[in-house]
Image (cartoon, rainbow, N blue to C red):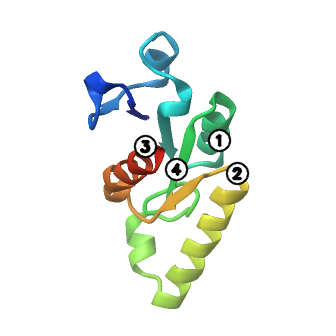
Amino acid sequence: MYARMKSEASAGRIHICSGATLRNSEHYLFSEVVKFGDTAADMQEGKNAGCVTVGVIKGSNMLGLGEEEFNALSSSEAAVGYETAKNNYIAAGADYVLDDITALPELIDTINKEAK
């Protein structure tokens, strides 16, 4: 999980914590937390907690392929797989869907800017 804090003291910082830490902390509001994952259950868990939810496609259980298997796909097969995974994340409650986890910090920046 990535928590995005809105307080002045922590502006612009991304905090990474486990669900257990989050549940036992007075410092986080679930509405200020981004729950990211690679399964429908991750999206449902985040939604149930009141978090912003983000599905990550590359290497995900939702895509259902290992790296070697994915790399063996044609570009059209890969596009179909990505689109199917994206639609499944959205159906499971994802607010956002990213192709790759490396895009998460930029998404959090965007969410924070929109929240101001």
- Check disc 3 and give the amino acid type: Lys
Q: Which image quadrant is residue 44 in?
A: top right
Identify the residue at image location x=49%, y=24%: 19
Q: Nearer the viewer, residue 39 or 89?
A: 89
Number of the front mark, 1 or 4? 4
As drawn, the label of residue 41 is 1
Q: Upstream in the sequence, badge 2 or badge 1?
A: 1
Number of the front mark, 3 or 1? 3
User: CA separation, marks 1 and 4?
Assistant: 12 Å
53 left or right of 15? Answer: right
Identify the residue at image location x=73%, y=57%: 91
Secondary element under disc 3, as helix, strand or loop, is: loop
Q: Upstream in the sequence, badge 4 or badge 3?
A: 4
Identify the residue at image location x=39%, y=54%: 110
User: CA separation, marks 3 and 2?
Assistant: 27 Å
**Residue holding disc 2:** 92
Secondary element under disc 4, as helix, strand or loop, is: strand
As drawn, the label of residue 54 is 4
Tell whether label 1 touches label 2 (CB within 8 Å): yes
